[in-house]
Image (cartoon, rainbow, N blue to C red):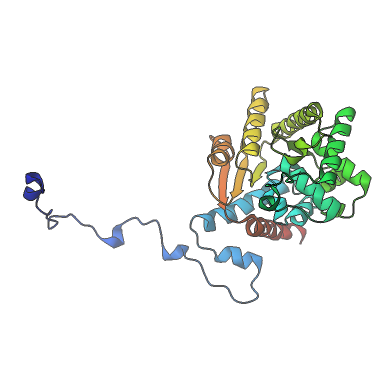
Amino acid sequence: MVSRKSQKTKPLEFSGLQTYSLHGRQSMVSVDDFGRPLLPGSSIRELIDSLPAQLLGRDFPELVRRLAAIHRAERPILVGMGAHVIKVGLNPILIDLMERSIISGLALNGACIIHDAEIAMAGSTSEDVAAVLGDGAFGAARETGEVINAAINQGAEQGLGMGEAVGRYLLEQKFTYNHLSLVAAAVRLGVPVTVHVAVGTDITHIHPSASGAAIGQTSYQDFRLFAAQVAELRAGAYLNIGSAVLLPEIFLKALTVARNLGHQVDDIVTANFDFMKQYRSLTNVVNRPTAGSGRGFHVTGHHELMIPLLAACLLDELADDSC
């Protein structure tokens, strides 16, 4: 049944609409900002210069320039990351940046040392969870549990943090693929590497060799070490790659304790790299730490594309310094 009110409604008359000239209007997009097609054989610099001056086409080159300036000023660039970065094959890229003294510190979650150690031991990682979960075999690889827990237990006895403990242990064992291990490379190069775990999230925690006391002691030691690095982050940079919750929370807590203790941590550049925008990484990495000073960036995209692109552009930007 049609209401009497709807029957009385008449179409709105638009003839009196007030207009203005398109040519006098302020517009957010101009042909001056358009991208340009590249010629075959173009350089990385020409690729960056060809991007449209819109959104990430504008922000990504600015991020590269800021990171280059930070490195030139010998200020720290810290990287926090999740394990997906390792699983898509980016260890060689990150190791190269450590060898060039561009990355000055690594903060990892617990899954990182699992996949990293498996790479070092076997040259492969990432089991098919769906295929083995039904019979309870997921996470039960013997060598993974034995090596990582032995490293952590030994590290607790020696008063080490978890990252250094695992890196040292891998080097001591002289595994075949140590040259592709992030933590082994970090220890070899003297780059601080910290590991931040949530008990029960990692497969090594279900192995009989796991010690809750050693895990807690070494990871807490690493939180304090990471906080010390954040305390020196003024005019530096923090990049969060592929950690949606744990590392953004760790970074925010380290930042607040550093400031609480009187360290002036401002004018920093932060950037989050992930497949999608996540609340905690946007809030705890991009927005809150740079409020008042500094600059935050968010880069949405696949790590296996965006991180090599970032590294290539950064090295190209810094290449002028060696000419």
Residue at figure coordinates x 14%, y 56% from the top left: 14
The one nearer the camera, 68 or 194, is 194
Question: Could you say which quadrant of the image residue 282 lies in?
Answer: top right
Question: Could you say which quadrant of the image residue 161 lies in?
Answer: top right
Q: Position of residue 176 (x, y in %)?
A: 89, 55
Is any part of residue 181 visible from this angle?
no
Image quarter in which the C terminus is found: bottom right
124 vs 175, left or right, is left
Q: Position of residue 192 (x, y in %)?
A: 79, 39
218 vs 131, left or right, is right
Q: Position of residue 66 (x, y in %)?
A: 63, 49
Give the vertical position of 261 relative to 64 (above or below).
above
30 vs 148, left or right, is left
Residue at the farthest front position: 135
Q: Position of residue 287 (x, y in %)?
A: 54, 39
Residue at figure coordinates x 81%, y 47% from the top left: 117
Give the vertical position of 124 relative to 110 (above or below).
below
The one nearer the camera, 124 or 300, is 124
